[in-house]
Image: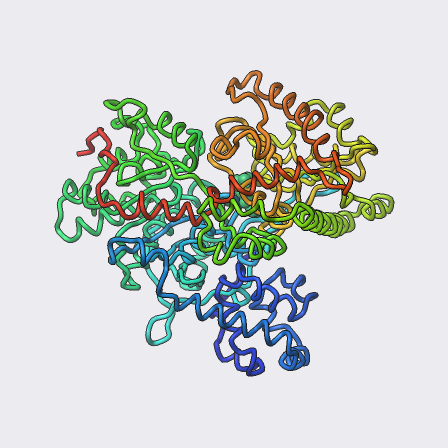
Amino acid sequence: MVFSPPSVEADQGYPPELCPALPKSLVRLCEISENYWWTWNEDALTVFREMDPDLWEKTEHNPERMIKEVSYLRLAALATDVNYLKTVKRMIVAYDHYMAAEDTWAKRTMRDPDTKIAYFSAEYGLHESLPTYSGGLGMLAADHLKSASDLGVPLVALGILYRQGYFKQRLNLEGWQEEIYESANFFNLPISLVRDSSGNPITIDVRIRQRTVKIQAWRVEVGRIPLYLLDTDIPQNDPTDRWITAHLYGGNNDTRMAQEIILGIGGVRLLRKLGIQPSTYHMNEGHAAFLTLELLREEVEKGTTFLDAEPKIRQQCVFTTHTPVPAGHDAFTPDSMDTFFASFWPALTLNREQFLNLGARRAGDPWEPFNLTVLALRYARKSNGVSKLNGEVCRKMWHVLYPTKTEDEVPIGSITNGVHARTWIAPLFWNMYDQYLGEHWEEHMWDPEVWANVDKIPDEELWENKAALRERLVSFTRHRVLRSRRERGEDQDRIQAVGNLLDPHTLTLGFARRFSTYKRADLILRDWDRATRIFSNAKRPVQIVFAGKAHPKDDEGKRLIQRVMEWSRTPVLYHRVAFIENYDAYVGRNLVQGVDVWLNNPRRPLEASGTSGQKVGFSGGMNLSVLDGWWPEGYNGKNGWAIGDGVDDPTIQDDIDAQSLYDLLEKEIIPMFYERDEHGLPRRWIARMKEAIRTLNPLFNTDRMVSEYVTQIYEPTQASALPLTVAIV
Ligand SMILES: *Cc1c(COP(=O)(O)O)cnc(C)c1O
C-alpha cells in the first residue's frame, strides 16, 4: 500500500474572487461548476468538456479545475464562439429554471408542508470527481439525492468527506491488486467550507476516546439538495483524530466506530448548529444509527425521561437496511463500546447494561456485540429492505428480535432500488427518447405509458445507436488497457496487441462490480475449457469486459481478479477478454451504456438489490442474471435472461448456475444476436431490447423509488414498526 499523509493545513475552499477572471459571457460557469446538477444536464456536460477536451480528461472531468486551469486564450476564444455561447445560454436558462422551479412533484403531492428529511449515509457516489464512495451503497445514496432534487423533495443530506477517499486500483504483472491512496486537494473540488456569518468555519465538537474532536463541514450542491460532508482533518485536532476521516472503510474497528460517531452524532449536532430541525431522519444503512442516541440525549437533556423519549425518537427515524448476511452488519464489542461511550450513557440516564442492550440481538447477554442494525431497527418508525426478496430475507434474519411475531409480521418492508436515469442514460439514447417518447417524458419516468412508446423507435435506429455505444466502449477499453499495460511494464507484444483488443461488431458482455466472493466473478470460469471455447469461437464471437475492486483486506477477492486476469492471458482469448482497472462511476457509465449483455451472478440471496443492471436497461443493454435482488421483480421471460433455477442450495448452486450460464449463452443468447435478416438486423434481439426498455425502465429508476419513500416512508405519520419487544429499562 502506498500512503501519502493527509495535508497539513486544511484548505479554505474556493475563493469566489477567482470567478471574475472568466470572460463576462462565461461568468456563470463558475457557479454551475459548483453544483453537481451539471453531471446530469447534457448541455452542461458539453460546455465543460468542450472548454478543453484534453484538459477534461486530465482533470478527470472536474469543472472546478477546468475553470482554474484552462488557458485564458482558450477562454477568450470560446467567448466569441457563437455555437458554444448558444449552448452556454441554453444551459444557464435550464439551470435557473431548475433551481427556481416552484411547481414540483413534491409540492403537488406531499401533504405536510413541514416535512423536512435529513438523509444520512456513509458514502455518496455523485461523480468520479468526488471520491466519497466505494460501490453500490454510495451510488444509490447519490441517485437518491439527485431524484429528490428533481422531484423537489425537501431533503438535506449528511456524510463524511474522506481526505483520501477509497483507493485507486492498479494490477501488477501477476494480476495482483495494489492499492494507491491519494490525498484529495479539497481546493479543487466543488465543495465549500461551511462558515458562520462572520466568515469563520463552523465547527462542532464530539467526544471520541476521551478527547474532544472538532469537526468542520463542507457543503456540496446536488441540484436543489445540500449535502454536508463532515471532516476532522483540521489543525486543532490531535494528529490521530485528523486521520479519522482519512479513508472510506479503512482503518480498524475503532476507526470505523469513530467515523460512525462523527456521522451520526456529529451529523445531528451540525444540523442543530445550522438551525435545521428535520421532521424525519433517514438512516441509509446502519452506519448512521448513532444518530438515534444523540436524539435521545437531546430529549433527556430537555427533561424528558428516557422511557418517554423513546417513542418520540421512534416517530422521527426511518431506516433502510441493505445487508442480507448477519456478518455484514456493523457490530462492536462491549469493550469498544466502553471505550467510546462510557461518558455517553449517563447522559441518557442509563447504566452500562441498559445501554448495551440497545444494540443487543439478545438482551442481557454480556458478550453480545452492539449491533447498529438492531439499534436502528429499535428506533425506526419504518424500516425497509431494498428489494422484495431482500425484504423477505431481512424479516427472516431479524425475526429473532420480535419473538412474539410471525416472520411475516416482522416490521421490515421493502422499497426496491432504482437508478437516476438522467445520470446513466447515454446521451445518444436520451436524444432518441426525446424524439419518440413524447414531450416531458423525463418528468414521467415511472409511467409505463411513456415507455410503451419505445415501439415507435425504428429498429434500425435503435440498433445503430447501440452499435455506436458498443464501439465507444471498445475504444474506451483499448485506451484504458493500453495505459495499464504500459504502466505495469508488460512486454511489447502485449502492448501492441491492444490495437486488436475487442471488436465493435461482436456480442459484448460486461461484468463490473466489487470483487466480493459472493458476487462470483469467476463463475463464468467454473468450466475453464468450456468458457474458453465459447469466447474463442471464430464464427460467432463473444467478448467480455471486466472491472471491479476488491476490498484491500479481501485476499480472496483479489485472487478472483487474478484468476480473471490469468484467463484474459490465454492466447486464444487475447482479443476477447479485457479487464479495466480502477472501476469508478466513469468506467461504470462507459460499461453500462456500451454492453449488449450485463452479467450478474451473485450467490442467491446475497445481493440485496444490485443496481448496475438497472443502468444497462436505459441504453439498450439486457440482463443475464441470477434471480436475486431486483431481478425477480424485473424479469418477465422476454426482457433478458435468468440464470439458474432459483434454488438456493449452496452445495450445488455454483455448478447449476455455471451450467445454466453456458447453456443460455450457447443456445439462446449467441444465436439470437447473430441471427440477421436481409438488412443485417437481429430482429428478435431488437424486440427483446425493446421489451426490456418498455418493462424495466418505468420501474427501476430513482424517481419511482424516491416517490415511494415519500409516500410510504417519509409522509405517513403512523408508526408501523412496533417497538422491539425486549424492554430495555
Ligand atoms: C452502479 C454501480 C455500482 C453498484 O453495482 P451493483 O450492481 O450493486 O454491483 C457499484 N459501483 C459503481 C461504480 C457503479 O456505477
Ligand 1, image quadrant it occupies:
top right
- Total marks placed: 0
Residue drawn 66% across the image and 78% down it: 81
Q: Is residue 160 visible?
A: no
Q: Nearer the viewer, residue 242 or 267?
A: 267
**Quick one: quadrant of the C terminus?**
top left
Q: Nearer the viewer, residue 86 or 388?
A: 86
- Left or right, 570 with reference to 689: right
Residue 686, image x, y percentages? 65, 40
As displayed, is residue 507 above or below residue 140? Answer: above
Residue drawn 56% across the image and 78% down it: 26
Q: Nearer the viewer, residue 273 or 61?
A: 61
Q: Residue furthest right?
A: 493
- Left or right, 97 with reference to 569: left
Q: Nearer the viewer, residue 34 or 242?
A: 34
- Left or right, 392 with reference to 490: left
As displayed, is residue 709 above or below residue 666? Answer: below
Q: Quadrant of residue 268?
A: bottom left
* Colouring of the image: rainbow
Residue 16, image x, y percentages? 48, 77
Q: Quadrant of residue 363?
A: top left
- Left or right, 179 with reference to 259: right
Q: Is residue 623 visible?
A: yes
Residue 354, image x, y percentages? 22, 35
Residue drawn 20% across the image and 33% down it: 728
Residue 275, image x, y percentages? 27, 63
Q: Quadrant of residue 529?
A: top right
Residue drawn 68% across the image and 25% down it: 662
